[in-house]
Image: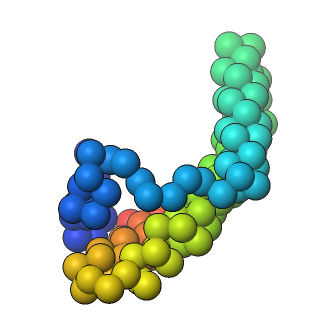
């Protein structure tokens, strides 16, 4: 498993993996819709490969999936920022604030590494 940035100990803030806030309803709805689109795109690529479609057509579709995954990631990051990060930054404990900062840095590092092809 690949990790980026400092190891984040979510159990230190969220014991037993139980988070304090739920996903924002609108973001959850949009994220689930996005996953269904991605599933359809993947099934389409599978059929294209089985049918031995033109390689450039397959590549075009795989790039579309990457863009869809980027949109899904954006929704999940938005939810995280609006719920867990804001809660941790406003917490009285410096450990929770440090955790929130480390999570933001990890997201930045993942995004930066993926966009530059590292």
Which residue does the image show at 73% across and 33% down from the upper left? 36
Tell whether 53 sits left or right of 105. Answer: right
Position of residue 58 measured from the top left corner of the image (x, y, whole percent): 71, 34
Q: Nearer the viewer, residue 72 or 28?
A: 28
Tell whether 82 sits left or right of 101. Answer: right
Q: Is residue 40 shown to the viewer in this render?
A: yes
Display colour scheme: rainbow
Q: In this figure, what is the number of numbered marks?
A: 0
Which residue does the image show at 66% across and 57% down from the upper left? 24
Q: Is residue 100 above or below residue 71?
A: below
Position of residue 3 measured from the top left corner of the image (x, y, whole percent): 28, 58
Position of residue 102 measured from the top left corner of the image (x, y, whole percent): 31, 76
Residue reaching furthest to the front: 92
Q: Is residue 100 above or below residue 52?
A: below
Is the C terminus in the top left, top right, bottom left or bottom right quadrant?
bottom left
Which residue does the image show at 26% across and 52% down from the upper left? 15
Which residue does the image show at 27% across and 70% down from the upper left? 5
Is the N terminus in the top left, top right, bottom left or bottom right quadrant?
top left
Q: Is residue 66 above or below residue 96?
A: above
Residue reaching furthest to the top: 50
Q: Is residue 56 shown to the viewer in this render?
A: no
Position of residue 28 measured from the top left corner of the image (x, y, whole percent): 68, 49
Q: Nearer the viewer, residue 50 or 13?
A: 13
């Amino acid at each position: 498993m690949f990790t980026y940035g400092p190891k984040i100990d979510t159990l230190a803030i969220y014991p037993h993996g139980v988070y304090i806030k739920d996903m924002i309803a609108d973001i959850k709805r949009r994220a689930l819709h996005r996953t269904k689109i991605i599933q359809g795109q993947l099934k389409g690529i599978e059929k294209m490969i089985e049918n031995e479609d033109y390689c450039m057509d397959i590549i075009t579709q795989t790039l579309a999936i990457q863009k869809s995954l980027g949109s899904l990631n954006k929704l999940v990051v938005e939810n995280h920022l609006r719920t867990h990060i804001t809660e941790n930054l406003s917490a009285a404990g410096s450990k929770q604030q440090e955790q929130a900062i480390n999570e933001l840095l990890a997201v930045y590092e993942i995004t930066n590494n993926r966009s530059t092809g590292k």
